Image (cartoon, grey):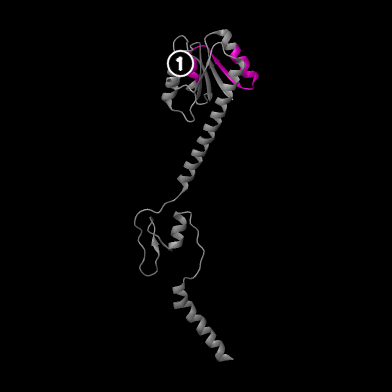
Amino acid sequence: MRILIAEDESVSRRLLEKNLIGWGHEVIATHDGAQAWAELQKQDAPSLAILDWMMPGLDGIEVTRRVRQRQTSPPTYIILLTAKGRKADIVEGLIAGANDYITKPFDRAELRARVQVGGTVVELQQSLADRVIKLEEALAHVKLLQGIRPICSYCKHVRDDHNYWQSVECYVSEHTEAKFSHSICPNCYDAIVKPQLDEMEGKGGSTG
């Protein structure tokens, strides 16, 4: 997974980068909020970001707010890295749009666990986004019958949008996903088919 790091303290940034790479992730390391924001605006922006709360210029909270205002799909999973441990500070970060947080100095096992949770969420969001796209594509190909269609009172052919007349079954097949098989209704059997069969049987009997 591609992960963005935004940390102005060099030692902490190197530790983050080393651990994440060691766990098999691709890391984009930045040293302030402005660089992080620039990376997160790109078309191929990382799906997970670890942002230090306190950075010169744009801090982690402001970067988080800007990311949420963009409303990307799927949204970037954001973990705030902070030395602030008060509940009020944590609540502020979550209200700004962060998904999770970890306190500094970070515990290696805790960092890995929180990143794994983030990765799972990202995968689920991407899977959902892919399904939505497929559903939209499927709906775009569905043809609907709308409005009033002229139909001949005698032969029951339907006039299409190009002023061509065609059978009802052809028209419906072209404009919907419906497929037809042919059969005989009871009324037609009694009125048309049965008399023909009786006539054929009568002729057969007379020749014998």
- Residue name at image x 37 percent, y 70 percent: 154
Rendered view: 206 above or below 59: below
| Percent coordinates x, y for residue 144 in the rendering | 42, 51
- Residue name at image x 37 percent, y 53 percent: 146
Q: Is 33 one of the magenta-colored residues?
A: yes
Please name whichever residue, 177 or 14, is drawn nearer the observer in this view of the structure: 14
Callout 1: helix, strand or loop? helix
Please name whichever residue, 71 or 45, is drawn nearer the observer in this view of the structure: 71
Rendered view: 189 above or below 29: below
| Residue 58 position by quadrant | top left
Numbered marks: total: 1
Q: Residues within 10 Å of mark 1 (few under 14, many from 20)?
A: few
| Percent coordinates x, y for residue 78 in the rendering | 50, 22
Main SS of residues in magenta: helix
Q: Is 107 one of the magenta-colored residues?
A: no
Please name whichever residue, 157 or 49, is drawn nearer the observer in this view of the structure: 49
- Residue name at image x 45 percent, y 54 percent: 176
Quadrant the N terminus occupies: top right
Taking the image as shown, residue 49 lies to the left or right of residue 168, namely: right
- Three-letter residue code for mark 1: Lys
| Percent coordinates x, y for residue 117 in the rendering | 56, 26
| Residue 88 position by quadrant | top left
Stretch in magenta: 15-39
Quadrant the C terminus occupies: bottom right
Query: Which residue lies under the disc numbered 1?
Result: 87
Rendered view: 80 above or below 141: above
- Residue reaching furthest to the front: 87
Please name whichever residue, 49 or 142, is drawn nearer the observer in this view of the structure: 49
- Residue name at image x 49 percent, y 45 percent: 138
| Percent coordinates x, y for residue 149 in the rendering | 36, 58
